[in-house]
């Protein structure tokens, strides 16, 4: 259990309808949990939930499930990335039930990066399921059944999430894929890192036309750059990432000196946050500081981003006496507030 | 149901399912023609559960991640595959081609997980006996 007792879950934050803030921290390469705990404490009070990536880009790190369980002990609600690259349907099911047993409820269902770009390019990629079938699998588990039909009692309480990349072709199909993911059971959606704001706005316009923003909470991905070199690397070497030339130019102008480059990276990130929060239909921001946890609080304070759970803890504190804890998943949990029209809130 | 069954088809399916001694030789006879024609025309990978007609007549098994429900997030800016930069993304092609089909909405259908035990078997015979898409999603 967490040191400070029950803490607001990401699902509770989703229900508030307030702008959400999540971030990602790497599980790391240390067998000592203190390394992860130290980095987790840097972001704990600034976000609603913390994503734990699963061997991103096919590079091996500590197990995401283990890292997520450590975060639960720290009083953080983790969002566990589950990819289809390393696990077949048996392993996926046992990991998901195990995650629920460890108090990890939010699962981000991903296809996963191919092994060929990672540090073990010779490994055999699995891809037994794809991300949509994985979402369907989570829905089946939530109903208390394995894919085989065998019963799980009690059923795992999982909150399935999905991702989308508005910056990769076929652009017209991306919003439709979001629709497919909603139909497969996704309850929240985190997007790829945004540098091309007009492209993101066009994506969101189509999403609104399809009425999808009212059916799922969409969090826009934002990541601060640390140097011109990393910006260039992302532009050239990371497929599906669109770093605009304007951003590269600004990072170049900041020069190679670390402090100045980082300052420029933060400034760009804050500007992007301020631009995309004007876009209608967005439920929040998802920060992805790559090995730079300090940037989360910095961006949050500069852009005045607050986690929705702060409102929850405030109401819980105000409601002294009988039930201090905010509403946990109860009988009415299936009726998501996302069915209500979501106005511009981010 | 993997394919809308018109009236009477179900009884045909039941007959073939109930008579493996007819079905099996039939499959052996059909298989070479199916392999050659689909491999030449669509680069078929013989998954045994053909959904070509629902994915813009583009075989989704040509995708290095064998994605059957849409493109991954790694498609390059020029529409090429992240794993094999020389190859156009299967799903970029599928999406473009599906627009020409009268049943273009089929691409939005959620495809169930593959039954890998059917790999190498005849999808045509599978369609005939209603074996495709048996695995629960």
Image (cartoon, rainbow, N blue to C red):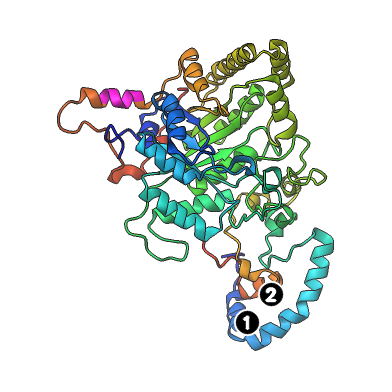
Specify the farthest residue to the right: B40
**Up-down: is B106 above or below A198?**
below
Which quadrant of the view contains residue A129? bottom right
State the mark number for residue B125. Answer: 2
- Residue A7 sits inside the magenta stretch: no
The image position of residue B134, as x and y in percent, is: 56, 68
- Residue A312 sits inside the magenta stretch: yes
Question: Which residue sits at x=65%, y=88%?
Answer: B21
Residue beneath disc 1 = B16
Work out whether residue B116 can be spotted: yes
Which quadrant would the N terminus of chain B be assigned to in this image?
bottom right
Task: Tell me how many marks there are.
Answer: 2
Q: Which residues are magenta?
A: A310-315
Neighbour tally class for label 1: few under 14, some 14-19, many 20 plus, Cα within 10 Å: some
> Along the polypeptide, which appears first: circle 1 or circle 2?
1
Question: Which residue sits at x=35%, y=38%?
Answer: A73
**Up-down: is A191 above or below A179?**
above
Which quadrant of the view contains residue A78? top left
- Label 1 to label 2: alpha-carbon separation: 9 Å
The image position of residue B135, as x and y in percent, is: 54, 65
């Amino acid at each position: 259990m967490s040191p400070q007792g029950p803490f607001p879950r990401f699902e509770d934050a989703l229900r508030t309808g307030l702008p959400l803030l999540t971030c990602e921290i790497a599980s790391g390469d240390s067998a000592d949990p203190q390394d992860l705990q130290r980095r987790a404490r840097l972001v704990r009070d600034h976000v609603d939930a913390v994503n734990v990536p699963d061997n991103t880009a096919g590079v091996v790190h500590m197990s995401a499930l283990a890292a997520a369980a450590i975060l639960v002990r720290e009083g953080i609600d983790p969002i566990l990335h589950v990819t289809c690259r390393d696990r077949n349907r048996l392993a996926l099911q046992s990991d998901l039930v195990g995650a629920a047993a460890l108090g990890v409820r939010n699962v981000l269902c991903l296809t996963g990066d191919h092994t060929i770009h990672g540090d073990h390019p010779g490994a055999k990629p699995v891809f037994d399921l794809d991300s949509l079938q994985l979402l369907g699998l989570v829905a089946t588990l939530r109903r208390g059944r394995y894919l085989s039909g065998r019963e799980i009692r009690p059923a795992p309480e999982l909150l399935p999430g999905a991702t989308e990349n508005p910056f990769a072709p076929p652009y017209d199909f991306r919003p439709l894929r979001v629709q497919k993911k909603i139909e497969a059971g996704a309850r929240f959606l985190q997007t790829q890192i945004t540098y091309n704001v007009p492209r993101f706005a066009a994506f969101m316009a189509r999403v609104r036309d399809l009425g999808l923003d009212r059916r799922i909470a969409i969090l826009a991905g934002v990541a601060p750059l640390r140097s011109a070199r990393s910006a260039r690397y992302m532009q050239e070497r990371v497929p599906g990432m669109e770093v605009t030339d304007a951003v590269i130019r600004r990072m170049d102008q900041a020069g190679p000196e670390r402090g100045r480059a980082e300052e420029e990276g933060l400034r760009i990130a804050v500007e992007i946050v301020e631009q995309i929060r004007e876009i209608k239909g967005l439920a929040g921001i998802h920060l992805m500081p790559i090995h730079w946890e300090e940037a989360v609080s910095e961006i949050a304070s500069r852009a005045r981003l607050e986690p929705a759970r702060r409102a929850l803890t405030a109401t819980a504190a105000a409601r002294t006496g009988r039930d201090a804890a905010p509403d946990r998943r109860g009988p009415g949990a299936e009726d998501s507030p996302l069915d209500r029209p979501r106005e511009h809130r981010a | 149901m993997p394919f809308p069954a018109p009236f009477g088809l179900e009884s045909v399916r039941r007959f073939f399912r109930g008579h493996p001694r007819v079905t099996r030789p039939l499959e052996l006879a059909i298989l070479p023609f199916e392999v050659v024609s689909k491999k030449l025309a669509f680069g078929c990978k013989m998954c045994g559960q053909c959904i070509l007609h629902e994915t813009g007549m583009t075989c989704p098994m040509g995708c290095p991640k064998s994605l059957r429900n849409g493109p991954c997030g790694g498609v390059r800016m020029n529409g090429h595959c992240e794993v094999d930069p020389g190859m156009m993304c299967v799903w970029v092609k599928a999406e473009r081609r599906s627009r020409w089909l009268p049943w273009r909405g089929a691409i939005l259908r959620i495809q169930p997980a593959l039954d890998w035990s059917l790999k190498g078997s005849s999808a045509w015979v599978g369609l005939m006996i209603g074996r495709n898409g048996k695995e629960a999603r």
